[in-house]
Image: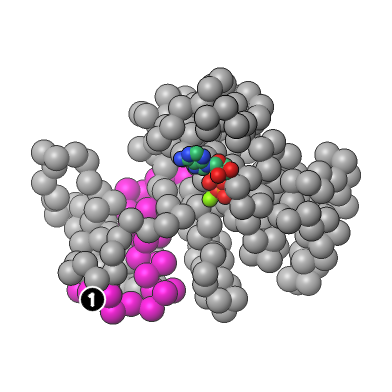
């Protein structure tokens, strides 16, 4: 089981009175490899921002490694849905990853920070790209650079918002292989609107559409997933029923 990294209890959130999240309960444990699936507008990005303490819930309680999110978020490596970087900006891969070690305005990067960048680039399989301008990367390489930036602080949890969107299936496979490698060191959790992006490697699945339905652990039997919460069809992207999710798991070799 391991340690509890994230604990969300009875979380509610709304924008201008429109409920976006209702009574969300979720635990993320040390060894988790979890996907949270839901349609566009289902509240996935909002949930991630709440975990990170970037926005406050209306109600409910959040603990990250036993601390409030503002403090606890230092344990989390975060990959945003839309990168905050302009590809034309004259900056190298090394310097982008180094940003992940930033500790405030008075911070001077140390040798240790630079060593951590090297190590992250090796982990991501791009050790030779350090001096490359970010404008000279393929989409898949750029995604790896962003993941390197998210893990360069050696977080206990890598939390990603749609990490597999807009990359082709071949690239998705290689990113999955990377997750399988990374999860030996940290919990891996991502949100996606794309059922097709769920692979057999994932051990826990939750469905989010304002409410959250939790389906893990998988333990090789997906019948459980159908039974688990009375098949929350409305919680799956675009009304696609669970059958399709199950089929996909089988198709992907599981
Ligand atoms: N800053 C905002 N102000 C008002 N409404 C927002 C804001 N951000 C998101 N929303 C709304 O909240 C709902 C959930 O959005 P979001 O969490 O981004 O969903 P997802 O990431 O699952 O697509 C959507 O209906 C969206 O339009
Ligand atoms: Mg989103």
Residue farthest to the front, as pictured: 16
What kind of element bears circle 1?
Answer: loop
Question: Magenta segment, which residues?
Answer: 129-157
Q: Quadrant of residue 135?
A: bottom left
Q: Nearer the viewer, residue 238 or 151?
A: 238
Q: Which of 114 and 166 is in front in this view?
A: 166
In this rendering, the answer to whether 219 lies above or below 128 is above
Image quadrant where one finds the C terminus = bottom right
Q: Name the residue under label 1.
A: 132
Q: Residue 252 vs residue 162: left or right?
A: right
Q: Looking at the picture, how far across and down is residue 180, in whole percent?
A: 55, 62
Kindly tell me whether residue 44 is visible in this rendering.
no
Find ligand 1 in the image and state its quadrant: top right
Q: Residue 239 vs residue 42: left or right?
A: right
Q: Which of 125 and 244 is in front in this view?
A: 244
Q: Nearer the viewer, residue 71 or 120?
A: 71
Residue at position x 14%, y 40% in the image:
105
Q: Quadrant of residue 18?
A: top right
Q: Looking at the picture, how far across and down is residue 66, in whole percent?
A: 47, 25
Q: Looking at the picture, how far across and down is residue 208, in whole percent?
A: 67, 43
Q: Is residue 118 magenta?
A: no
Residue at position x 78%, y 72% in the image:
251
Badge 1 crowding class, 10 Å Cα cut-off, few under 14, some 14 to 19, many 20 or more, is some
Q: Is residue 147 magenta?
A: yes
Residue at position x 88%, y 52% in the image:
223
Q: Looking at the picture, how far across and down is residue 153, in whole percent?
A: 32, 48
């Amino acid at each position: 089981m391991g340690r509890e990294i994230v604990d969300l209890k009875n979380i509610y959130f709304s924008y201008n009175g429109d409920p976006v999240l209702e009574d969300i309960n979720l635990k993320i444990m040390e060894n988790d490899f979890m996907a949270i699936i839901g349609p566009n507008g289902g509240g996935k990005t909002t949930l991630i921002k709440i975990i990170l303490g970037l926005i406050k819930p209306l109600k409910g309680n959040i603990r990250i490694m036993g601390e409030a999110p503002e403090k606890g978020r230092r344990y989390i490596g975060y990959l945003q849905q839309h990168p905050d970087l302009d590809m034309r900006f004259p900056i190298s891969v090394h310097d982008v990853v180094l940003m992940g070690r930033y500790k405030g305005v008075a911070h001077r990067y140390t040798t240790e920070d630079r060593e951590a960048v090297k190590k992250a680039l090796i982990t991501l399989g791009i050790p030779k790209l350090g001096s490359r301008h970010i404008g000279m990367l393929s989409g898949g390489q750029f995604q790896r650079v962003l993941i390197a930036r998210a893990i360069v602080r050696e977080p206990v949890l890598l939390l990603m918002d749609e990490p597999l969107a807009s990359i082709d299936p071949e690239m998705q496979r290689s990113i999955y292989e990377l997750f399988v490698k990374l999860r030996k060191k940290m919990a891996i959790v991502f949100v996606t609107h794309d059922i097709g992006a769920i692979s057999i490697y994932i051990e826990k699945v939750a469905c989010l559409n304002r409410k959250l339905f939790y389906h893990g652990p998988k333990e090789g039997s997906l019948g459980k997933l159908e039974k688990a919460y009375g098949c929350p069809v409305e919680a799956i992207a675009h009304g696609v029923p669970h059958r399709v999710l199950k089929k996909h798991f089988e198709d992907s070799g599981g």
